[in-house]
Amino acid sequence: MLPTLKNGQDILVFNWWKLLGLKIGDIVVVKKNRKEMVKRVGQMSFDHGIFVVGDNQKFSTDSRRFGPIKKEQIIGKAIWY
């Protein structure tokens, strides 16, 4: 799959994402190892966290490599891109 976003592309991120909720397929900004990344929500589990994936799966560093993330690691939800 080709990337949805290009390097340097502007996006509008809503950091009160809990008001909107999350669903599979949403684009989110996450913080992992002091680095911000834009990923897509792949799966959600209250017990195991949120599995995020990159659209360009062949080259993406995502939950397939570092595992699920916690809700606290989500900076915001992209609402415009």
Image (cartoon, rainbow, N blue to C red):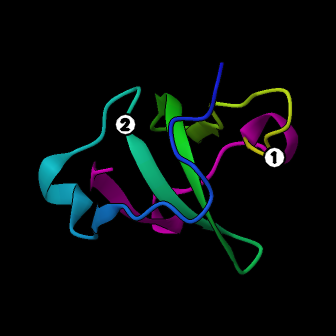
Residue 42 seen in this snapshot? yes
Residue 66 placement (x, y as % from top left)? 82, 48
Which amino acid type corresponds to the residue marked 1 in the rendered image?
Answer: Thr
- Residue 25 in magenta? no
Q: Residue at position x 28%, y 64% from top?
A: 12
Q: Which residue of the protein is positioned furthest toward the bottom in this rendering?
A: 34
Residue 8 placement (x, y as % from top left)? 56, 66
Provide the residue span drawn in magenta: 63-81
- Residue 66 in magenta? yes
Q: Do callouts 1 and 2 mark residues in contact (Cβ within 8 Å)?
A: no
Residue 41 placement (x, y as % from top left)? 49, 35
The residue tagged with tag 2: helix, strand or loop?
A: loop
Q: Residue at position x 85%, y 37% from top?
A: 59
- In the image, 34 versus 68, the foreground residue is 34
Is disc 2 surrounded by few (<14), some (14 to 19) or many (20+) residues within 10 Å?
some
Kindly identify which residue carries mark 1.
61
Q: Residue at position x 31%, y 64% from top?
A: 13
The mark found on residue 26 in the picture is 2
Is disc 1 surrounded by few (<14), some (14 to 19) or many (20+) residues within 10 Å?
some
Alpha-carbon span between mark 1 and mark 2: 17 Å
Residue 34 placement (x, y as % from top left)? 72, 81
Which amino acid type corresponds to the residue marked 2 in the rendered image?
Answer: Asp
Q: Residue at position x 74%, y 43% from top?
A: 62
